[in-house]
Image: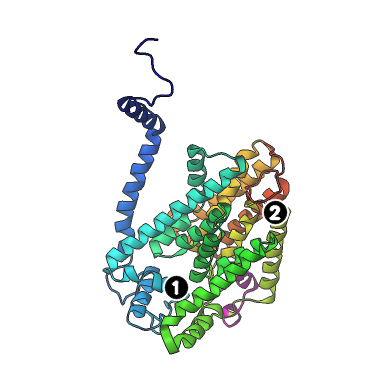
Amino acid sequence: MCLFDEDPNRSPHPATAMARSEKTIRARTSPLALFGAVALLCFLIAGGFYFAGRSGTDLHRYKNDFNVYYFAAHEVIEGRDPYLNSLGDWTPYLYLPLLAELIIPLALMPLQAAAYSWFLIGAASLLTAAWMSATLALKNENESSGSKRFIIGALAVAIVIRFALDNFDYGQVNTLVAALCVSHVFLYEKNRKLTAAVALVLAASIKLTPLILLAGHLAKRRLRFVAISVALFITITAFTFAPFGSGASGAFQTFFHRTVNNEQGFDLAYSGNQSLRGTVARLRGDNEESARVPSDPVTLAIALMMLTASALTAMRKQGSWGSIASLFCCIPILSPLAWKGHFVVLIFPAAVLISKIASTLRTKLSYGLIASLLTAFVLFNLTSPRVAGLATSEWVDRHSLIFVGAMVIYLATICSVWMGPGTIRDPQSNDNPPRVC
């Protein structure tokens, strides 16, 4: 045997391995990916300075919603509950104490630095939600293609981009809530059920409406997961109020009356409220008193019908994650008060529908889903005052067209399950219908 013959069982020379590794990296790193990474980095740096500036520099002056969170965190640091004092009569703290307590590390920074960090948290939450949504969507086809994940995630972000920018502009928390909601699905799919419950409970401990997602688990008969989630929610809520000592009961009552009962007095018929409750109030022409009631028989009846339809859809596809996508639509729709930024949570159903289109090309279902997403994209993004002008945007709000776009996606997610063969699968299910392309 020639002395220079290579032993097939011998490891390659380190220099050879390094050369191969460099070639592989160059092959896998496309110019488009590099351009996208650089563009994203530039956006985060430049965008952070712009959006941080929206919060101003005065702790005691309202500029956007982050000022409210930042002020509430300072109240907690100083030993008071976050409901006692407000920046203004119409800018009170409306959430459970958890959010104010979580951002205490930000409250120790100067306002501008804290606002910059808050923007980075929001942007990271959006990107994470897009990545997890696209990953879950690709589970349908048992694929892990990076390019497909990027395309689905990018298109899903495009559907909700106006809402994401609104969140950054107003310093809102909705991108974080959306990421937690999607991560609970992602973690459950990984069979990390306790961590999934924690993620869902954290989202619900910031805003109550993510508890709607438990309806999907109930429909799939995951009673143990629901029980654990409810117990965790009660426990975390108790712990977040505990630091207020003897004033904890009063703080909880303030939160319940102010937020749940809307005793703050928000006009739910205001055109900016794109929820079901706001739409019904505008269509019916509710007066000032009735427009402040969080629920009414008509709204409640429609909400129950929507939840029932989502539950039946989840029951039809026991092993499908796509079957609970409609419940993500219900989070802002069924909330009594839903500003446009709240609809960023639709990133998950958007990714589900995009994946469904890819797996059912040239069918009536795919054409219908494409039409639904295009309709939603136009209603969501091309009606922005920066695009269509302030007068057109206000007309759109008065006629509840953002709500209409969300309902279009809701109905599309329902139809995609009842009419389509492909689903995003729960690996623990024994329900394995054949794949149809």
Quarter of the image for residue 123 reads bottom left
Answer whether residue 270 is magenta in the image. Answer: no
Q: Residue at x 50, y 71 (%)?
A: 205
- Locate residue 70, reporting x and y percent: 35, 72
Q: Which residues are magenta?
A: 277-292
> At label 1, which amino acid type do we have?
Leu
Classify 384 as above or below 251: above
| Residue 296 visible here | yes
Q: Nearer the N terminus, badge 2 or badge 1?
A: 1
* Alpha carbon distance from label 2 to label 1: 33 Å
Q: Which residue: 65% across, 46% down?
A: 423
Residue at screen point 38% across, 14% down:
5
**Count of marks placed on residues:** 2
Instruction: Name the outermost residue toward the bottom.
Output: 246
**Kind of residue sitting beneath label 2:** Gln
Which sits in the foreground, 275 or 220? 220
Is disc 1 placed on a helix, strand or loop?
helix
Is 168 on the left or on the right of 141, as rendered? left
* Residue with the mark numbered 2: 318
Q: x%, y% of residue 318?
A: 70, 53
Q: Which residue is mark 1?
A: 98
Looking at the rendering, in which quadrant would you find the C terminus? Answer: top right
Q: Could you say whether the residue bearing mark 2 is in a helix, strand or loop?
A: loop
Prevailing secondary structure class for the magenta stretch in the rendered image: helix
